[in-house]
Amino acid sequence: MTTAHDTNTYRTPPSIIATIIGISLVASLFLSWLVYYHQPTDVAGTQLAFLPALNAALNGLCTIFLLIGFSRIKARQITAHRNAMFAAFIASSLFLVSYILNHAMHGDMKFPAGHPTIRFIYLWILLLPHILLAVVALPMILITFFLSLTGRFPAHKKIARYTFPIWLYVSVSGVVVYALLAAYK
């Protein structure tokens, strides 16, 4: 029999959630500033020109780890699931570092206007949902990890149902964004 005290020890303090959301908001605002207002240091893109391909590779790697993690939890292989999800988190974290470096140096890559149909698809059907869901995914990923690391598995499972498909979409669409930009530049 559980008491009210036992139940409360498993509740996530609102201050933790507020902190995660606050950090995510600051990160999103910083990235918005970096992409849309910061003057790049290497507009010609001559230094570290491999960064966009590295970003796509890290997104692809994250996708693979997410799918492995999903398959392992379905098979009730908890340790393998946890390892795959940590690997996905590391790949995403490395992506974020590489993304920041790329945008600080090279700025935002514009899709060419000479292909209006594919440009419309790229901007409104692919990129807009990718950006919006990436903003939503960050706090969800952090909260999902926090719940797991603190042993709040029922709550972890509830939010992971939503975190997983959003994180997967952001990872896959990140690779597609790179592929389209590379194909039409």
Image (spheres, helix red, strand yellow):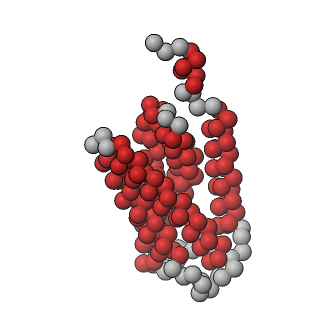
**Residue shown at the point (41%, 64%) measured from the top left:** 60
Residue at the (40%, 51%) spot, across then down: 83
Residue 54, position in %: x, y? Answer: 48, 73
Horizontal and vertical percent for residue 151?
A: 49, 35
Residue at the far left in the pictured view: 75
102 and 169: which one is in front?
Answer: 102
Residue 121: x percent and y percent? 45, 64
Would you identify the image quadrant in which residue 35 lies? Answer: bottom right
Left or right of 15 on screen, residue 92: left
Residue at horizontal 69%, vertical 59%?
30
Q: Quadrant of residue 40?
A: bottom right
Front-most of residues 153 and 70: 153
Residue 12 horizontal side relative to residue 152, left or right: right
Residue 10: horizontal and vertical position, in percent?
Answer: 54, 27
Is residue 51 positioned above or below 12 on the image?
Answer: below
Quadrant, the N terminus: top left
Q: Is residue 175 visible?
A: yes
Q: Nearer the viewer, residue 119 or 86?
A: 86
Q: Is residue 61 left or right of residue 141?
A: left
